[in-house]
Image (cartoon, grey):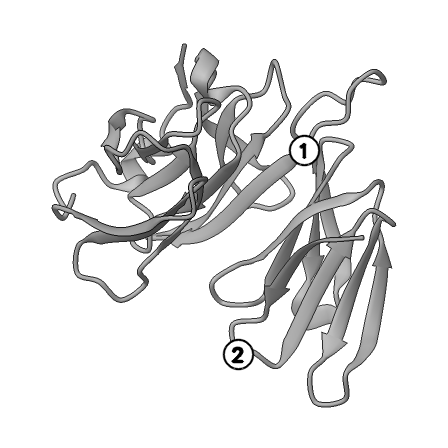
Amino acid sequence: AINTLAFTPDSALLVSGGQDGIVRVWDLSTGLDSVTVPMPGAVNEVRFSPDGTLLAVGCNTGSIVFLDVMNGFKVAHTMQTFRHLRRWTPTMTLDMCSAADGRLLLVAGARSLHGGVRVWDITDLQAPRLAVTLSTAEMCGVKRVRFAPDSTAFAVITKSFELVLCDTVLGHNLGMLSQQQAAVSGFAFDPVASRYAVTISFADGTAEYCTMPDHSQLPSVVRGRESGVVVE
C-alpha cells in the first residue's frame, strides 16, 4: 500500500513510499519508476526541500533518511528522531522549509508517547541540531505538521484533532486556527497569501478557509538557532 506521495517542485517527478519500505521515483513523462531506494522500514511520509535538492523520508523505525536529489536520490544522511519500540510502530509526519540562513526540519511521531513535535536545524546535514521540542500531552500523538509559507510558524493537528499554530523559534502556541467543534482531518497553507491563510477540512465533511494577521513581528528563525528550546 502507498502511504505518501510528493511531487518535485518542478512537477517533473513523483515520489511514492509505502508499507514495502521502498521509495520510488516516477518519471511523469514515461509513467515508469526510474529510481527505487530501499528504506529501513515502512515509509510514512516523503517531503522535498523547497529548492528540490533534498528529499526527507520518514520511516516507521523512527528514522529519517535524506536523499540527495541532484545525485540520483542517493542516501546523503540518516538520523534517528524517535525511539523504535518493538510493541508499537510509530507513525511519522514531517515537513522541511528554507530559512534565512539554512534549512529546518519539522517532525512529529503520530503514535509517539515520548517524542512530541521537534524542529531541527539541518543546515549542516551531517550534524543536525535540535532547536525546539514540544512535549506537552497534546503534542504527543499529533496527526500532521506543516510549516507556514514564511517558515516563522508551523501548524499542528493535535492529539485532540485541533489545529494549532506555533512559533518556529520558541515553540509558543499562537492560537487555534479554527473555532469549529468538529475534529480537524486535514489542512493546507495558501502559498501565495500575504497573511497566514489555511484551508481546513473536518471529519464531518465540511471545510473552511481561515486567515490570521501577519506575524512579521515574530522573532526571526536565525535568532532561534542560538539554543534549543523545550516546552513541557
The disc at residue 10 is 2
Q: Residue furthest bottom?
A: 29
Using the image as rendered, state which of residue 41 and residue 199 is in the foreground: 199
Using the image as rendered, state which of residue 23 and residue 187 is in the foreground: 187
Task: Give x and y (percent) for residue 11.
Answer: 56, 78
Q: Earlier in the sequence, mark 2 or mark 1?
A: 2
Determine whether the residue tagged by mark 1 lies in a helix, strand or loop: loop
Labels 2, 1: front one: 1
Which residue is located at x 28 percent, y 50 percent?
208
- The number of discs equals 2
Task: Give x and y (percent) for residue 9.
Answer: 51, 72
Answer whether residue 123 is visible to the viewer in this image. no
Indicate whether 70 appears above or below 213: below
183 horizontally vs 149: left or right = right
Task: Give x and y (percent) for residue 223.
Answer: 28, 35
Using the image as rendered, state which of residue 184 and residue 19 is in the foreground: 184
Which residue is located at x 47 percent, y 16 percent?
135
Indicate whether 166 appears above or below 25: above
220 horizontally vs 205: left or right = left
Task: Report the amino acid beneath label 2.
Answer: Asp
Task: Give x and y (percent) for residue 59.
Answer: 74, 40
The disc at residue 163 is none
Bin the neighbour count of mark 1 within 10 Å (Cα to Cα): few under 14, some 14-19, many 20 and up.
Answer: many
115 horizontally vs 87: left or right = left
70 horizontally vs 24: left or right = left
Which residue is located at x 16 percent, y 43 percent?
215
Disc 1 target residue? 91
